Amino acid sequence: MRQGHRLRQVSVIAGAGAALLLAAHPAAAAPTDTVFPIPVAALALSVGSSELPRSGYTYVTATTDPDTPGVTRLGPYNGVHVHWRNVSTGAAGVAYLGNRDGTLVETGSGTVVAVATVPQPDGIFFLIVVSTPGAGVWTVP
């Protein structure tokens, strides 16, 4: 094989490779999970029972995705209220986390601060004696 012919083959292959690299789509950003650094905790008594008090805590997770700007998925926890405020836009609200798949909240884009609390349950079986709120901050694309 002649040297000129070989050089031409290498050039064509290199050019095709460069074209493929330039035509490739950039990798999409993955969803981001932000775990509240302060967990929400509660101590509850069983009403009308001799059971010992029950306690527990949980770390709330805020998940954002660049493919859905302005939306945050909170959870997946049951029985927690998240009081949030977007400090970039002033929007605010309360989300009740009652869905095991998480709760979608339209927070808008910007920096969001939140406090998670345990509400007094409906019914007469448990009484929340004491609770400490959880808290977190995240950025929504």
Image (cartoon, rainbow, N blue to C red):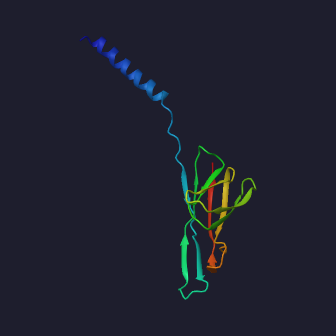
- x and y, in percent, of residue 53 in the image: 55, 84
Q: Front-most of 101 and 51?
A: 51
The quadrant in which residue 97 appears is bottom right
Extreme residue in the right direction: 90
The quadrant in which residue 35 appears is bottom right
Q: Front-most of 97 and 4?
A: 97
* Residue drawn at (61%, 68%) of the image: 79
| Residue 107 relative to residue 42: left or right | right
Please say if 94 is above or below 65: below
| Residue 1 relative to residue 82: left or right | left
The quadrant in which residue 125 appears is bottom right
Extreme residue in the bottom direction: 50
* Residue drawn at (53%, 44%) of the image: 29
Q: Front-most of 73 and 12?
A: 73
Task: Name the quarter where the N terminus is drawn.
Answer: top left
* Residue drawn at (74%, 55%) of the image: 91
- x and y, in percent, of residue 137 in the image: 63, 61
| Residue 72 relative to residue 87: left or right | left
Q: Front-most of 54 and 73?
A: 54
Please say if 95 is above or below 30: below
Please say if 124 is above or below 59: below
- x and y, in percent, of residue 101 in the image: 55, 56
Please say if 65 is above or below 21: below
